[in-house]
Image (cartoon, grey):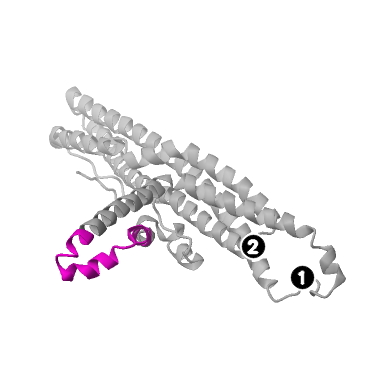
């Protein structure tokens, strides 16, 4: 792609009149190459189309998280909230990187167009001063008009990308706010682990407070069920995959058991295999559970550590 740059503090280079026609063809090719940047990027379209749904999900999760935090949940519930919000933030933050790369590319293209416009503007002034023929002036004017039109298209695309980037950044900020709220409640809960917050077992006050216990248990159970339901909704595809894997393994191992039992009277070497396949459903369940390390990303596993998830809060729009 032809580039015409102007050194800082110097007048833009001018094109001599005999070279106008040739350089005009080069500019036309360069503008066609730049127009390729305006072709819709599927990744950008994914971010744009999924943003309303993502924003609604985050708003609903914020309300749910607020209610859960007000109930002073157990540490295990807080850890689940931290991990789920980190996974959601990772998913949203991926869109920012996609948009940032797009905006940087468009900015570079606009810089090229600025250099071309300066060069051809100076060329027009010099050609007019040298009384160049009218066809040459018309060719220069056509090049300037094409550069201006390309710049208008590029600026419109850049503006749309920057607006979308700002919207995604706001969603990331909402995730960060939720993480900060959960972390604050969790830190407070950990700080109170070794502080007596209730009367000793021999105190009469303790037995007067036992009426609060059922409500507290119901609150924790409701928070846990809500988190499990949210996980099932957001990972339905993975759950179906794991269920299908479990069913397939169960059928395969049961068939292996039947085959081993038919062969075991004839071949003593198959006796060990027959014993191994005596529990096909338990073996299938174990294998399906082990497959969780492959099916679910680290931040979605119940055993995933908060620190690891935070360190890996990556940059893809889709998890």
**Relative side of 147 to 21, left or right:** right
Residue at image coords 41%, 41%: 47
Name the disc covering residue 272, or none: none
| Residue 265 magenta-highlighted | yes
The residue at the point 32 percent across, 54 percent down is 250
Q: Is residue 273 magenta?
A: yes
Label 2: element kind: loop
Left or right position of 29 against 37: left
Q: Which residues are magenta?
A: 260-288
Q: Quadrant of residue 60?
A: top right
Is residue 198 at all visible to an observer of this figure? yes
Question: Looking at the image, is mark 2 or mark 1 earlier in the sequence?
Answer: 2
x then y, percent, for residue 203: 84, 73
Tell me residue 21's x, y (percent).
14, 32
Instruction: Reply above or below: 92 against 210.
Output: above
Q: Is the stretch drawn in magenta largely helix, strand or loop?
A: helix
Left or right of 157 on screen, residue 134 = left
Q: Quadrant of the N terminus?
A: top left
Question: Residue at label 1?
Answer: 197
Q: Is residue 318 visible?
A: no
Label count reads: 2
Quarter of the view holding residue 273:
bottom left
Q: Nearer the viewer, residue 65 or 123?
A: 65
How far apart are the two marked residues, 2 and 1, measured between alpha carbons? 14 Å
Residue farthest to the right, as pictured? 204
Please tell me whether residue 67 is drawn above or below residue 127 in the rendered image. below
**Image height of 133 relative to 48, above or below:** above
Q: Please state which of residues 144 and 40 is positioned toward the viewer in this rendering.
A: 40
Q: Which mark is residue 74?
A: 2
Circle 1 Cα neighbour tier, 10 Å, few/some/many (<14 / 14–19 / ≥20): few
Provide residue 140's location: percent of width, then percent of height: 23, 30
Secondary structure at badge 1 equals loop
């Amino acid at each position: 792609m032809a580039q015409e740059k102007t050194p800082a503090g110097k007048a833009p280079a001018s094109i001599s009149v005999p070279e106008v026609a040739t350089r005009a063809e080069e500019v036309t090719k360069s503008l066609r190459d730049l127009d390729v940047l305006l072709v819709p990027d599927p990744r950008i379209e994914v971010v744009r189309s999924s943003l309303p749904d993502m924003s609604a999900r985050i708003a609903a999760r914020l309300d749910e998280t607020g209610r859960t935090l007000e109930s002073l949940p157990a540490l295990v519930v807080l850890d689940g909230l931290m991990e789920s919000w980190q996974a959601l933030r990772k998913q949203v933050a991926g869109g920012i990187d996609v948009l940032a790369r797009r905006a940087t590319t468009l900015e570079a293209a606009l810089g090229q167009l600025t250099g071309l416009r300066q060069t051809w503007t100076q060329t027009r002034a010099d050609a007019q001063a040298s009384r160049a023929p009218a066809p040459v002036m018309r060719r220069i004017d056509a090049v300037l008009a094409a550069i201006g039109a390309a710049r208008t298209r590029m600026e419109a695309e850049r503006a749309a990308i920057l607006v979308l980037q700002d919207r995604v950044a706001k969603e990331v900020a909402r995730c960060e706010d939720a993480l900060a709220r959960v972390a604050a409640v969790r830190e407070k809960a950990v700080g109170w682990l070794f502080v007596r917050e209730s009367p000793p077992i021999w105190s009469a006050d303790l037995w007067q407070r036992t009426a609060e216990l059922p409500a507290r248990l119901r609150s924790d159970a409701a928070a846990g069920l809500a988190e499990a339901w949210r996980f099932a909704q957001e990972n339905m595809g993975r759950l179906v995959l794991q269920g299908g894997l479990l069913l397939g393994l169960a059928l395969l191992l049961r068939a292996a058991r039947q085959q081993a039992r038919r062969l075991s009277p004839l071949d003593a070497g198959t006796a060990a295999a027959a014993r191994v396949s005596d529990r096909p459903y338990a073996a299938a369940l174990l294998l399906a559970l082990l497959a969780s390390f492959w099916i679910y990303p680290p931040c979605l596993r119940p055993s995933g550590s908060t620190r690891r998830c935070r360190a890996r809060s990556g940059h893809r729009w889709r998890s």
